[in-house]
Amino acid sequence: MTTHQQLASPIAPTWCPGCGDFGIWTAFKDAAVQEGWDNTNTVMVAGIGCHGHINNFVKLSSFEGLHGRPLPVAAGIKMANHKLNVFVFTGDGDALAEGGNHFIHAARRNQNLTVILHDNAIYGLTTGQTSPRSPKGFKSKSTPQGNIEEPLQPLSLALTAGATWLARGYAGDIPGLMDLIIRANAHPGFAVIQVLQPCVTFNQVYTHIFFQRNMYRLSKDHDVTSKTAAYAKLLEWGEKQIPIGIFYQVREPTYEEQIKQLAKRTLVSAGAPKRDISRVLKKFI
Ligand SMILES: Cc1ncc(C[n+]2csc(CCOP(=O)(O)OP(=O)(O)O)c2C)c(N)n1
Ligand code: SF4
């Protein structure tokens, strides 16, 4: 059993008051308590950004690496012990700009990871530059005359690359987000939750009010096994046209399931055999 007291970190959150990261943090901890995630079965991996500070505010095993690189670290952890629940907390800058390559290939391999993409459509930590998610025309200190680029759609990208579980949630809907986090982790394969996460300090376009006015839940009739239906829904974005919920869910062999050496045991339980490497070392002396 995991309790909120056990997850409580001595470090208090440093996010700006009202930041959507608080909702993601709360939803994740609620999910951990409900599912019994603790240091024996769960690891958090984060990139660099405001989102990455989440590692400091939850008392679980965690790794915060280079900007854009949480996915390769998470993949390594999962390979060493595929029994662990491995969560990747990443930003839209982290996952889609510097980490774009890793995002595509982790999806293509269907690695059994849960990616929680804090999508505030801006570079928060570096004080509000335009990101690959910022809308066209978006004014920021890096695009003072308005962004001339089209935004990336991370879930369509992941779908094209080969991800097998895709959802969108909202940081202000904590019970809904908790449910998505639990389902994503239960899915065997590459699962992405795009979390609409207002940056109250630097993004005055994608605000809590904007999302609350324009979001709607995907209907029960949405066919989660259809790529075509998922693409159609993912094309929607605008006034009263931002669907949230599960877009896509299919069962395909995961990367780890296809590695024969992992079929019977984890790599970490196999241990490292003792080898005499003195002859090799002599060559370098
Ligand atoms: C290799 C490297 N490149 C760039 C940076 C500078 N940097 C730090 S955070 C960041 C962007 C953060 O934006 P995002 O990933 O969307 O996270 P947020 O802060 O919005 O949560 C950048 C460019 C860095 N720390 N390391
Ligand atoms: S700068 Fe934005 S993303 Fe970062 S803590 Fe403040 S509100 Fe949140």
Image (cartoon, helix red, strand yellow):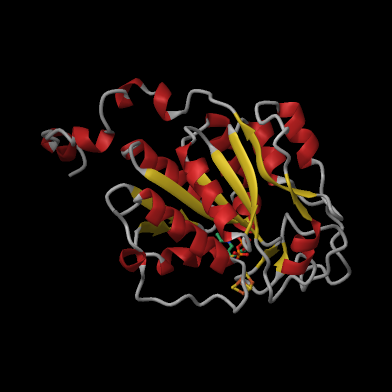
Q: Decide if residue 110 is on the left or right side of residue 43.
A: right
Residue 50 in sight in this render: no
- Quadrant of the rendering where the C terminus is positioned: top left
Q: Is residue 5 above or below residue 151?
A: below
Please, which residue is most extreme toward the front here?
A: 220
Q: Decide if residue 2 is on the left or right side of residue 183.
A: left
User: Residue 227 occupies which quadrant of the picture?
Assistant: top right
Q: Is residue 126 above or below residue 2?
A: below
Who's the residue at 60% across and 79% down the image? 17
Q: Quadrant of ligand 1?
A: bottom right
Residue 28 placement (x, y as % from top left): 48, 57
Residue 233 placement (x, y as % from top left): 78, 39
Who's the residue at 34% across and 51% down the image? 36
Q: How many marks?
A: 0
Who's the residue at 33% across and 37% down the image? 83
Is 25 or 217 nearer to us in this picture? 217
Is 173 or 101 nearer to us in this picture? 173
Residue 214 placement (x, y as % from top left): 80, 57
Residue 76 in sight in this render: yes
Residue 154 placement (x, y as % from top left): 68, 45
User: Residue 121 occupies which quadrant of the picture?
Assistant: bottom right
Who's the residue at 38% across and 40% down the image? 78
